[in-house]
Every structure is written in structure tokens, then in C-alpha cells.
Image (cartoon, rainbow, N blue to C red):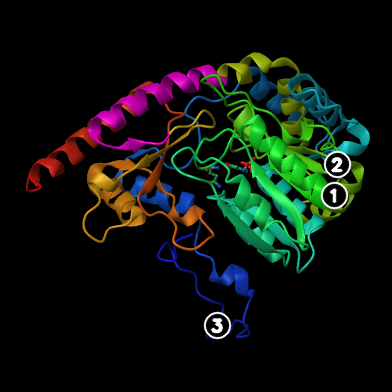
């Protein structure tokens, strides 16, 4: 993430605390851009289209089950693998939505959100010296947790404007040390949905080079515009080498619950489970029971997310284009990436622009240069999150029109 966002002391302290250097990687990290921009949004009372969280929450029945479960069941540690009813529901969900059969007893794990699941995967699967291919730009938690495992990230940059996979560059990036390819589809920050052709090429490389695939599919149900979510794990020969992650935060719009799950072959899951047992051990059982109910009974909720997001995206896309933003195409998740070149002041980058837009224009976005690991990231793109009430989206557009429109008028005509 950009170093200017909330720098953190590097562990050399005075006074009574230990003066020896603390963990180098974590001491060098800034606070995540999501926290930075949401804090700024609150300070300036801006319309927050930055951090990804929906305005409309998930099914009422799930809230009721979560709260009554706290009274109806005992509240002591559940199994470190998760409660059987959720693991069984995860297996049924995999088969019903992606046609991937899963043995719930040996091939499922419940995690504290996908975030913990990802950390457990990196720690459990990778050794120092391994290489992991990741597509640039990428969700920020991958980078630090993969590096903490001692592995090296080999970034392959998705091609603008549609974030397509450069298949030739991908093939060239695979070498003798490649242990894992990380795929996030639908993709954060771009909203890109990986195509069957891209997934088949990735599968072919994994099989040919004996590589594991880690599939972050937390936005699996958030697709629209004729796109279809295909899990890499569903392709021939891939069930044995893929670990696939899901999240109740995205599937049921309960981001604060932090319930996630993963499916994968027992051989891969075993060391991941060992990492999970010492990261968190387990997950609140009342929430697990509510998510089990949701996966089995609330498919209507998650299947309605795509169509409703498509309407919101179409609205925002049209308004932003009319204002002079260059909207990049995408068919998934709830993010829209826009080219802001037209609005940048001399020397200004995406981070400075996003901060100025929050403070002066009253609308918060996420600058995306910090999602890149490779050199010379684009600095003219910001991400809008549009899973918001229509009224909030309209208010944001009004503010953008007022602020950017006035600014454009002040600029000398060229
Ligand atoms: N992966 C991606 C791509 C995400 O956008 C998020 C968003 N929070 C996560 C993982 C983490 O999910 P959770 O909130 O379930 O930890
Ligand atoms: N996944 C969310 C996003 O991309 C944020 C998650 C977080 O704040 N950690 O905006």
C-alpha cells in the first residue's frame, strides 16, 4: 500500500519497552487503505464509496438464528474445523452451485472470514523460497501474508482496460520454484470475472507444472451482464490441486460476522487446518449455525445480488462517464474502476486525488496503485464501491458533479 498512508513506527522504541527490532515485515506496513479512507470519510462526512461493504444487510432469518442460537446451544468452543451443519451446508453449496462434489468431513474448513482462511493457506502451504504467481492488481491481504510465509510473489499484470490475463506472460512467469497460482474471480479491485478460456489456460499450467491453485471466490454470486462465475476447481483435473474460499460477508452481506469457509482436497487442507488451529482455533458457533441456514435456505438472497448490482452499476457507470471519468468494463463484485486522468492536477496521483476528493468533494473512493506489487503501477485509477442505497449513489453523483464540474470550469480552455 502507498507508504504515505499512516506510516507505522519500525519497532525501535525508547523508554521501558523492548528496544530490539520487532517483526520487520509488519513494522514496515502502513495501515490498510480501507481503514485509512473510511476514517477520512468519517472525518469529512463524505459519501463513502471506498471500503467494500453493502448498505442492505442479509436475511432477517439469519440474524434471528444467530441470536437464538446463542440461547439455544451452549457457547463453548466448537470443533476447530467448524460445526458439522455448516460444513455439510458448504459441501452442498459447492455441489449445487459449481457442480463440485465435496466430502464435508475431510474437505471443508470454517474460518474467521476469508481473510483468516487466506492467511492459513499461505502459512500452511508455502515454504521459504517458493514462488507464488499473483495477478496485479490484487487484494491487499495476500501480499503480506504470502511474504510472511517466506514465499516470493511473482506478479503478472492484468491488461487494461478489461483486466484480461496476458496468457503469454503468465506462462513465462511459471518456473521450477512456482508452488502456487492465486486466482481471485470475481476480482477485487476491478470487478473482472475470469473467462473460461483464461481459467482453462491457468488449469493447463497448474497441471503441467504441478502447481497448486488458491481460488479466492468470495464474490462468486456477484456476477451479472451475461457473465458466469466458473470455479477453477470445477475444471477437469483441478479439484485435487485447488483450494477454494468463500465468505458470508459477501454471500449474505454480513461483513462484520467474519465467517468464511474453504473446500479442497484433504492433503492440502491438512496443513492449512494446522495453521488455522493456532491462528484462531475456531469460529463463533452461533454465527456458523446462521450461515448454515443461509447456505441451505437463502439462495434467493444471494442469487438476487447480481441483478440488483447490475442496475446500480449501470446507473453509476452512466453518470461517471457523463462527468468525464473513463469507466473500465467489468461484470462482477461490487466495484467499478474509473480513469480519473481528466481530473488530476499536475503531479497529482490517485492517492492524492482520492484524498482531495474526500476532503473537498465529499466523496470517498479507493486509489488502486497500492493494489499493485510490480513496478510502476498505474496512478490514474480509483475504485468506486456501489453496493449502496440508490439515494446514496445519487448523492455521490451530485457531489461529484458540483465539485468536479466547478473545477473543470475554472481550468483555462486548451
Ligand atoms: N478476498 C477478497 C478479494 C476480498 O475483497 C475480501 C473482502 N473483505 C476478502 C477476501 C476477505 O473476506 P472476509 O471479510 O470474509 O474476511
Ligand atoms: N474487501 C473490502 C474491500 O475491498 C474491505 C475489507 C477490509 O476493509 N478489510 O473494500
- Tell me which numbered mark, 2 or 1, is placed earlier along the sequence: 2
Q: Does the residue labelled 1 lie within 8 Å of ligand 1?
A: no
Q: Name the residue under label 3.
A: 12
Q: Residue 196, percent across and down?
A: 66, 30
Circle nearer the viewer, 2 or 1 = 1
Instruction: Answer with the quarter of the image where residue 194 lies.
Output: top right
The percent position of residue 116, horizontal first and vertical second, equals 70, 49
Count of residue discs: 3
* Residue 217 in view in this figure: no
In this picture, residue 198 sits left or right of residue 212:
left
- In three-dimensional space, the C-alpha distance between marks 3 and 1, rounded to whole angstroms, equals 34 Å
Residue wearing tag 2: 81
| Distance from Cα at disc 2 to Cα at disc 1 | 7 Å
**Does residue 274 sit above or below 296 in this rendering?**
below
Residue at x-position 57% and y-position 25%: 223
* SS state under label 1: helix
Q: Nearer the viewer, residue 14 or 324?
A: 324
Amino acid at each position: 500500500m502507498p507508504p504515505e498512508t499512516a506510516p507505522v513506527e519500525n519497532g525501535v522504541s525508547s523508554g521501558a519497552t523492548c528496544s530490539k527490532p520487532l517483526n520487520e515485515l509488519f513494522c514496515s506496513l502502513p495501515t490498510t487503505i480501507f481503514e485509512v479512507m473510511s476514517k477520512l470519510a468519517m472525518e469529512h462526512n463524505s459519501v463513502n464509496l471506498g471500503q467494500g461493504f453493502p448498505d442492505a444487510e442479509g436475511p432477517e432469518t439469519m440474524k434471528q438464528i444467530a441470536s437464538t442460537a446463542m440461547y439455544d446451544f451452549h457457547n463453548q468452543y466448537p470443533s476447530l474445523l467448524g460445526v458439522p451443519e455448516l460444513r455439510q451446508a458448504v459441501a452442498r453449496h459447492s455441489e449445487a452451485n459449481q457442480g463440485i462434489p465435496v466430502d464435508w468431513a475431510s474437505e471443508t474448513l470454517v474460518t474467521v472470514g476469508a481473510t483468516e482462511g487466506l492467511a492459513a493457506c499461505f502459512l500452511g502451504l508455502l515454504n521459504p523460497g517458493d514462488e507464488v504467481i499473483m495477478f496485479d492488481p490484487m487484494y491487499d491481504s495476500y501480499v503480506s501474508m504470502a511474504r510472511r510465509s517466506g514465499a516470493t510473489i511473482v506478479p503478472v499484470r492484468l491488461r487494461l482496460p478489461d483486466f484480461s490475463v496476458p496468457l503469454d506472460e503468465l506462462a513465462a512467469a511459471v518456473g521450477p520454484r512456482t508452488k502456487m497460482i492465486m486466482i481471485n474471480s470475481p476480482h477485487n479491485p476491478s470487478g473482472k470475472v475470469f473467462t473460461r478460456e483464461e481459467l482453462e489456460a491457468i488449469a493447463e499450467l497448474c497441471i503441467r507444472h504441478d502447481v497448486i491453485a488458491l481460488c479466492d471466490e468470495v464474490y462468486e454470486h456477484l456476477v451479472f451482464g451475461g457473465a458466469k462465475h466458473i470455479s477453477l476447481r470445477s475444471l477437469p483435473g483441478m479439484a485435487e490441486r485447488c483450494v477454494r474460499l468463500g465468505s458470508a460477508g459477501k454471500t449474505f452481506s454480513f461483513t462484520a460476522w467474519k465467517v468464511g469457509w474453504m473446500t479442497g482436497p484433504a492433503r492440502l487442507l491438512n496443513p492449512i487446518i494446522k495453521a488455522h488451529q493456532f491462528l484462531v482455533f475456531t469460529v463463533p458457533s452461533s454465527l456458523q449455525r446462521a450461515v448454515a441456514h443461509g447456505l441451505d435456505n437463502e439462495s434467493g438472497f444471494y442469487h438476487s445480488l447480481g441483478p440488483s448490482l447490475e442496475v446500480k452499476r449501470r446507473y453509476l457507470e452512466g453518470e461517471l462517464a457523463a462527468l468525464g471519468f473513463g469507466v473500465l468494463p467489468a461484470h462482477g463484485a461490487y466495484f467499478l474502476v474509473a480513469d480519473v486522468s481528466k481530473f488530476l492536477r499536475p503531479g497529482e496521483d490517485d492517492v492524492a486525488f482520492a484524498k482531495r476528493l474526500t476532503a473537498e468533494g465529499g466523496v470517498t473512493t479507493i486509489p488502486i496503485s497500492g493494489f499493485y506489487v510490480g513496478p510502476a503501477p498505474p496512478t490514474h485509477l480509483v475504485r468506486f464501491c456501489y453496493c449502496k442505497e440508490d439515494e446514496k449513489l445519487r448523492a455521490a453523483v451530485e457531489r461529484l458533479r458540483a465539485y468536479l464540474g466547478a473545477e473543470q470550469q475554472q481550468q483555462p480552455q486548451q
